[in-house]
Each structure stands twice: as structure tokens, then as C-alpha cells.
Image (cartoon, helix red, strand yellow):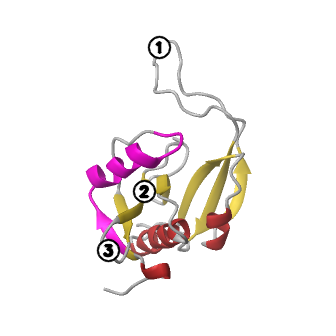
Amino acid sequence: MSRGRGGLVVVPLRLAAANEIVARLHRHHRPVVGHRYSIGAVNRSGRLCGAVICGRPVARHLDPDRVIEVTRLVTDGTANCCSLLLQAAARAATALGYERIHTYTLDTEPGTSLRAAGWTREHTTRGGAWTRPSRTRQPGPAGPKVRWCRVLNPPATVT
């Protein structure tokens, strides 16, 4: 097992383990219901320092067969953990044939780790909530969000 930045090792995670660290450490989101894959970062002593959860895009107009979304990224503050996990998520998505990987941040978050991992700021949303009178949802940040993207593979032609 090779050590990454600061002695961190990237490991596969079950959704339950990824959700546990999200429930414990994420500042404004709860655990997720499903995923395509999750990745953790473990330090030299074997402690889980962070996790990234990747799943189908939340926005219905994005093709879930070509685009994957980082739905949660959480760390305990260990140096370089965020960018290590973002790089690992992009490498896994590339290997799986996805064309793009993206994520959203609050417009108040600087995106430093995303820039360090080679992602580009793509779009700022107007914000808003998914809750409607006919379907209530768990509350989450409703303000504007920034979409960050990394292009991975050229578009595939499926026949």
C-alpha cells in the first residue's frame, strides 16, 4: 500500500462507513441514501480522516451514465485530505469511463482543494430548496451554489 500526501492512504469504503463520518463531521449535510462508490483516506495509525461519496447527479438533466457527482466530501481537517480524496474520486471515475465529475459548494466556500485537484469553477446556481407542498425534503442550505467540474474522458459513442 503506497502512502499519499502526508502519509494518507486511499481505501475503498462501504456507504455505511462513509455516511458515519459524514454524520459526525459534515458542516451542513446529512448522510446520503445511495452511491456509486465511496473512498476514504486513512492515516498511518489506521484512523479514517475523510471520505468522498460519489453518486448519480442530483440534477435530472445531467446524464447519470456519463456524469458522476461528488455528493459528499468530508474530512477531520487533516492536511491535504480533501484534495487527495477529490483526486482519487476523479481517477476512479476516469477508470469507470465517466466523461465528467462534478460537485457543488456553497458560494461562501472558496474551493481551494478543488482548484488544487484540477477542478474548474463552472457555474453558479440561483439557489433554492427542493421542498414543495406536495413533497417535503430534509432542510439543507438554500443559497446559491457553485458547480465545479473536471473533464475526464472524451464523449463515448455507444452503438
Q: Residue furthest bottom?
A: 2
Give the residues drawn in magenta, as a range: 10-29
Compared with residue 124, is residue 6 higher up or lower down, i.e. above or below? below
Question: Would you name the residue on which mark 1 appears?
Answer: 134
Q: Residue 54 shows which numbered tag? A: 2
Q: Secondary structure at mark 2?
A: strand
Provide residue 5's location: percent of width, then percent of height: 50, 81
In this view, the mark in front (3 or 1): 3
Q: Secondary structure at mark 3?
A: loop
In this view, the mark in front (3 or 2): 3
In this view, the mark in front (2 or 1): 2
- Quarter of the image where the C terminus is located: bottom left
Residue at 39% in and 70% down: 96
Q: Earlier in the sequence, mark 2 or mark 1?
A: 2
How many neighbours does mark 1 have within 10 angstroms: few (below 14), some (14-19), or many (20 or more)?
few
Provide residue 55's location: percent of width, then percent of height: 41, 53
Provide residue 77's location: percent of width, then percent of height: 52, 61
On the question of residue 37 being in view, the answer is yes
Compared with residue 92, is residue 4 higher up or lower down, i.e. above or below? below
